Amino acid sequence: MDTDQADKVQTAADQVLELEAELEAAGHAATGGSALERAQAILHKWVDSAKGVVISPALGRVTLIHQNGHVSSISSPDLPFAMSAPAEKKP
Amino acid sequence: MADSDTADLAGSAKRYWSEEGYSVGGVLREVDRSAFTKGLDPALKGIKIVDCDTHVTETPDLFTARAPAKYKDKVPVVRRVNGVDKWFVGDRDWGSMGGNVIRADKNKLLGRLAFPTFEEGHKGAHDTKARLESMDEMGVYAQICFQNSGVTQAGSLMSLHDHDLAVAIIEMYNDASAERQAESGQRLFTMGHLPLWHQAAMLAEAKRCLDMDIKGFVLPDTPERLGIPSFVDDYWTPLLEMCEARGAPLNFHLNAAINPTDLAWKGFSFEQTLSVVATMFSICNASTMGNWMVSGRLDQFPKLKIGLIESGMGWVPFAIEAYEHQFNEMLPSKSNFLKRRPWQYFKDQFWVTYWFEKTAPKLLLETLGVNKVLFETDFPHPTSLYPGVQEHIMETLGGYSHDVRKRVLERNAVELYNLPF
């Protein structure tokens, strides 16, 4: 990651923290090093545990459904499009 | 996984999509047609009521009938799956046909979003002649129309990974809207859709729409959700210039940016969930209004017209006063480009609609300004005023003068949408 990319990551993390601070909630940002590695490992394991996925490109959203019926929403301008396969001709 | 677990997961996915809303069920309300088909109330004589939020169901052949040969087997089509009509593009589920709770016999379905099949719903949802008849019965002269299904939503079309096809689908939708406007004798005005993901294509289609007399456009509150630049980006400047120059309003229909699964308590039935979600979709148009007010874009485009549609009016004074407070407390550093105050931005550049509300039109009309409020029915959606349009108008505007009624019911809409009467 070059300096410009690192700045963008830090800026995005700072903005999340600032808005959460408005609610007197302290978030914890991991943007590098072992803290990020640990977060990524847990995320990978958590994503792998999903038992269902709802892809909603119209809403810019992907929803994971877990075994206990809980749902987790990911708002993303990229993920739902990356996950949408081109429509195939219906026989 | 056990079968019960699989069933739970399927249930979660269905709840997410409000699929239950399109299933068989609900409660049918018998409508006394004789009481609700009398047309315009005599007290409103001389007023051409413009219903500023209605929905037209896209007909199953809308795209196949207009598609060039190369797209005939690629455009959206309707298929019946498990007894429910849905849009498909190829093998991709493209969503429901949209809300229509007026049955063919004009009784109203409660507790659902639509009848499961196209034919069960009232023809006025899609057929121009039947719709005009319904409007005459309701005493409505003209309607501002919006999409019913999500078949032309930019995000869905972007996910096709076929730009030319996606643009063609938008063009077909807008062509059908222009044809409907002409066929209706200038009584049905459908707002245009645009290929938001491609600036040149968006501008070309916007110009084409305005040239064929489409009166305005529908835009999403936060295009960045789809990876499209924010409205503060120069990406949008040419479109805003065009709309300002030609007097074409931008319409923000509800605010669907909020996530319904975050709003209602888990464990609710479909009906309980939707009651909360539908209300919040309306109120959250306050964020759309605020985003524009703090953006500086209204100072760059002081003649731009913005309609906040299907979102009511009762919340508006609170939201404006909240933004007034924020301008005092948070935004002094932006006074170099925010040249006006929220109340002034509103009075200069926004319009709002009301339908089921009683308190706000009775008590807040003059606070907001009699030239800023429009009337709507949301026909044929579940929250629509049907039946009883004239009764509701008289209950809410009966205490005002004829001039005020005409302004709210007709002239505001005529001026916002540049209607030909």
Image: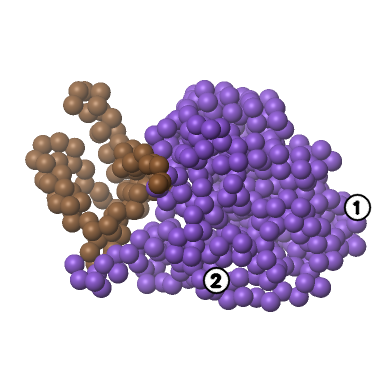
Chain colours: A brown, B purple
- Image location of residue B235, percent across then percent down: 49, 25
Cα separation between marks 1 and 2 = 37 Å
Which picture quadrant has residue A18? top left
Give the labeled residue for mark 1.
Answer: B46
Point 31% across, 38% down: residue:
A82
**At 70% from the left edge and 69% from the top edge, which residue is drawn?**
B105
Chain letter for mark 1: B
Q: Is residue A51 left or right of residue B105?
A: left
Tell which tag, 1 or 2, sits nearer the viewer.
Answer: 2
Q: Residue B395: name its quadrant.
A: bottom right
Circle 1 residues within 10 Å: few <14, some 14–19, many ≥20? few
Q: Nearer the viewer, residue A7 or B153?
A: B153
Residue type pointed to by label 1: Gly
Q: Quadrant of the N terminus of chain A?
A: top left
Q: Say which residue label 2 marks.
A: B111
Under circle 2, the secondary element is: loop
Q: Is residue A82 left or right of residue B368?
A: left
Chain identity of mark 2: B
The tag earlier along the polypeptide, 1 or 2, is: 1
